[in-house]
Image (cartoon, helix red, strand yellow):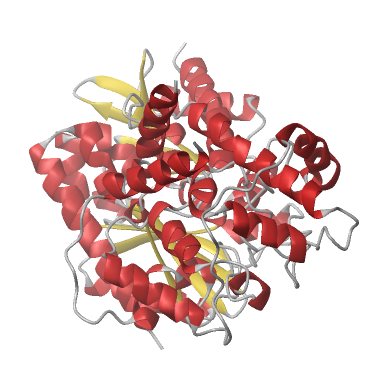
Amino acid sequence: MSWLRRSILALVLSLSAAGAAADDMLMVRARIPFAETMLALQEAISAQGYTLSRVQRVDIGLTEFGFKTDKYRVVFFGKPDEIRRLTETHPELIPYMPLQVAIFAEENETLLATTNPTHLTAAYDDAELTEIFARWANDLQVILEKVRQAE
Amino acid sequence: MKILLRSSFAILFVLATGTHAATPAADGAQLYGQNCAVCHGDSGHGGVGVPIALAAFLSSVDDSYLRETIRSGRPGRVMPAFTRLSDEEVEAIVHHLRSWKSGDVPRFKPKPVRGNAEHGAALYAQHCAACHGKQGQGGKGTGVTFSRPRDLPVIAPALNNAGFLSAASDAMIKQTLMQGRKGTPMVSFLQQGMSEQDIDDVVSYVRSFETASALAAVASIDDEPAVLTMESPYDLEETVEAVKRAAVGKNFRLIRDQYLEDGLFPPEQQSHKQVMVYFCNFKFLYDALALDPRVGLFLPCRVTVVEHEGKVMVMTINPKRLSHLFNNAELDRACEEMFRVYSDILEEATL
């Protein structure tokens, strides 16, 4: 019985640990206020060769409906030609484009978060997409690190 | 048996995380800044993650607890497992955390506490369940979450969590029950009138969560598709209108619709073959953000209508697959609901 119990524990815990790895999410804290962080994010996105396509003002919608929230936006961006090409060759990827980063205030600091695109690798099982997801992940890390170090 | 169980927890997490090459002279402050500060704050005051610089916390947990927590995280409770940090790096982070409070570092014996778990269950229901949950599932939400109002300054830990049970020794749990944690709602239960034997009974009951925790089903995302897709019998414009009607029929407010290439190309060059329809239920959005402030990444809701090679497809992300990345069991439940709503909208729009 004890062997069986430990075996079940082993299976469940190994699965649990594998499903909660720190690099599933890409997140940083900027030590500067929201407005400055938003500017730094936009500059970092451009510097990495991406075009900012839209800023979704989540906080505005919430406050209009009477919900209290601090500043909260979602920034969308992509490489136009790459997105156009991928919509033709891999239309099943469309719901994940453009890339996006959530940016929200926590008192006088600002948090940025996005999902690691490499989480899609197993779902698509495509050599070209695997490379693209890895490059996106790298680019997102570069962008977020620049914002983290912004002063 | 209990020692064996806890040992197996620890060994299994180490096995699951793989081996790590030693790194030279790790800088704890820098590593903390890179890996922990985003959630716990630069000075450990909390945020998405719980505050860890509290003197009462640091004086009631040993280094083993901190190490194991970093390594294993808290499955389903936001704190991820830092599997890529080397042993030296984990040690450096623990050393950095210790720099926030002077004084002796607690050391606990691994000896299990012997108590009556049945009596402990009754005491737990009376004294602990209000904050930690009937089944030890912990308080709702994440950390202190400064981005929105909260009733309590901190979230009550999930005592039934495999990561917690792996990290915390019986002696550590006992000391916390006896002394409480100043600056949090956790009071000293000795001062509340419990005897030391009562506290041993509660510890035994908390330890019994190990069995339930281990036997709990663990959802796998491998079977979940990355996107939800349905083919529409209508043309693109008709399908866009059908999506809007279906969303409104599900009590959502339409936010906007736009071409996928909007903002990426000048208007006259944009493809009209991919239309994104955004809609939102602000109560649902607010509740979801209270569960996890990062979830705005895939809210408001979006369905994309795509014309490709003569077919019109309706597609969206699969919230169940994305939710897994957030390591938040409460969010998983909300995303189950989102999954049903998306499926209904896609089905209704393509009937």
Q: Is residue B64 above or below residue B199?
A: below
Q: Residue A3: horizontal and vertical position, in percent?
A: 38, 25
Q: Please provide percent x and percent y for residue B107.
A: 53, 69
Q: Quadrant of residue B88?
A: bottom left
Give me the residue at 35% from left, 38% from top.
A14
A15 sits to left or right of B332:
left
The answer to whether any part of residue A127 appears in the image is yes
Quarter where residue A67 is shown: bottom right
| Above or below, B116 relative to A80 | above
The residue closer to the viewer here, B20 or B4, is B4
Q: Viewer-proximal residue, B19 or B284?
A: B19
Q: Is residue B22 left or right of residue B254?
A: left
Q: Residue furthest right?
A: B193
Residue B133 image-quadrant placement: top right
Q: Is residue B280 above or below residue B187?
A: above
Quick one: B6 or A82, which is closer to the camera? B6
> Who's the residue at 48% across and 48% down the image?
B166
Tell me the residue at 40%/77% (across/down).
B33
Query: Percent from the top left, x then y, of residue A24?
Result: 34, 50
Q: Position of residue B213 (x, y in %)?
A: 54, 34
For the image, the number of numbered tags is 0
Q: Is residue A105 left or right of residue B205?
A: left
Using the rendered image of the protein, determine whether residue A79 is visible from the camera's viewpoint.
Answer: no
Given the current orientation, which residue lies at the most extreme left position? A127
Residue drawn at x 34%, y 46% is: B11
Residue placed most toward the observer, B82 or B126: B126
In-image side of A118 versus B43 (left or right)? left
